[in-house]
Image: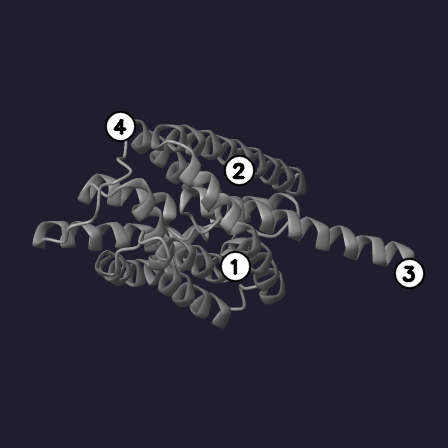
Amino acid sequence: MSKHRSINFARILTIVVIGGCAGFLSGLFGVGGGMIIVPALMIILDMPQRQAAATSLCAIIITAATGSIMYATQGNVSINAMLLVSLGALIGAQIGVWLLRILPEWLLPWIFVTFILSIIVIQQFHEPLRASRIHVTALSAFGMIAVGVVSGIFAGLVGVGGGGIIVPGLELVVGAGDLIARGTSLLAMIPTALSGTFTSFRYGLVDLRVGLFVGAIASAITPVGMWVAQSISPETGNILFSVFLVFVCVSTVMKARRRMRKHSQEAN
């Protein structure tokens, strides 16, 4: 009995840590937290990639809602941009979930790594301005829809809410400031995550208890990350974001190598 309780306590404590880290990063970078939740669920709780991705989307619903409200109270959310990005993201999420079902398991971590490396490269070519706002034109509207489609595909495919694409995408496409890009990104994640979670739940891919628990813990810590984001310069934020992405990339590669080694040993 004591062993069973200790295992449950360790699992709960692990989920609390995962949620806390995801919430802090959500407030700091305007991401849903999927970039920490997915590899953490895989590495620490030994979830398969597909289940970790689907469960991450469930948690992102709560985290993104909390973060977007916090940013909106300070005027750092663009409703028009959110609607355009969400339109594209809803389409992309369904494409991503479809790809999740047909692509081989071993390929998914490498798609995730490619996504992370792409974001790191993008971050090095752009330095956002804090005070810049979002102005919607015909050209920028098309660009924001395209950003949404790409972010939605990765949301459905690897469980990332798309903030890693939406934030630099808004900064590059429409010249948004870093804070309004993060706030708008979090708001745009909500319909994407809802759509992806519903579809994944129908296929039995979501661990609902873990997803809701992680999301609840994350939402409590999100304001702390937001406070830090407002306290540091955009340049420092870019550097911290790149460091974080490198860490996630290395962790995912290590996990993928361990799984491949295990499968190779079982085959022999």
Label 2 with label 1: CB-CB less than 8 Å: no
On the image, numbered disc 1 is attached to which residue?
A: 59
Q: Is residue 29 or residue 116 the one in the foreground?
A: 29
| Image coordinates for residue 14, horizontal then vertical, percent | 69, 49
Q: Label 1 neighbourhood size at 10 Å, few (<14), some (14-19), many (20+)? A: many
Callout in the foreground (3, 4): 4
| Image coordinates for residue 153, horizontal then vertical, percent | 34, 54
Q: In the image, what residue type sits under mark 2?
A: Thr
The residue depicted at 31 percent of the width and 63 percent of the height is: 90
Q: Identify the residue at the far right of this view.
A: 1
Label of residue 1 in the image:
3
Q: CA distance from mark 2 to mark 4?
A: 24 Å
On the image, numbered disc 2 is attached to which residue?
A: 252
- Say if 128 sits above or below 226 in the image: above
On the image, numbered disc 4 is attached to which residue?
A: 125
Quadrant of the frame with the N terminus: bottom right
